[in-house]
Amino acid sequence: MKTIDVSLTGPLIVREDLRLNGIVVGDVTVPSGRRIELNGEIHGGILICAGPHADIHGVVHGSLHDEGGTYRIGGQVGSIRAPRGHRYV
């Protein structure tokens, strides 16, 4: 898993397993087969496609839209849309 400590303007598409320590201003997409661990903030939403895993230890100021991934929330999310996901709060 790659670790980055950064503040950036998105949108961000996760291309490899990622530990993100920082802030993203914009939306984040986690494609199938990828994993993200967020230690910080997303000033936008996060899309979790079918298959990936997300650990959120921070704040998502927008919505979390889950299309079939697995996620764990140890922080705050504005809203959750999870028609098929495996949620762990």
Image (spheres, rainbow, N blue to C red):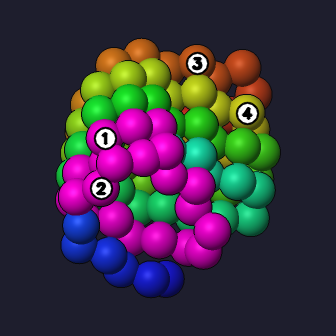
Up-down: is 15 above or below 76? below
The three-letter code of the residue at mark 1 reads Val
Q: Which residue is at 75% across, 28% downward?
A: 84
Q: How far apart in space, not on screen, are marks 3 and 4 (Cα)?
A: 9 Å
- Residue 24's spot in the image, x, y percent? 31, 48
Up-down: is 79 above or below 87? above
Q: Which residue is mark 3?
A: 81
Up-down: is 5 above or below 51? below
Q: Which of disc 4 and disc 2 is earlier in sequence?
A: 2
Q: How far apart in space, not on screen, are marks 2 and 4 (Cα)?
A: 25 Å
**Disc 2 vs disc 4: which is toward the camera?**
2
* Residue 14 belongs to the span the image colors magenta: yes
Q: Which residue is mark 1?
A: 25
Q: How far apart in space, not on screen, are marks 3 and 2 (Cα)?
A: 25 Å
Instruction: Inspect this view and state whether residue 77 appears.
Output: no
Q: Which residue is mark 4?
A: 67
Task: Identify the element where label 2 is drawn.
Answer: strand
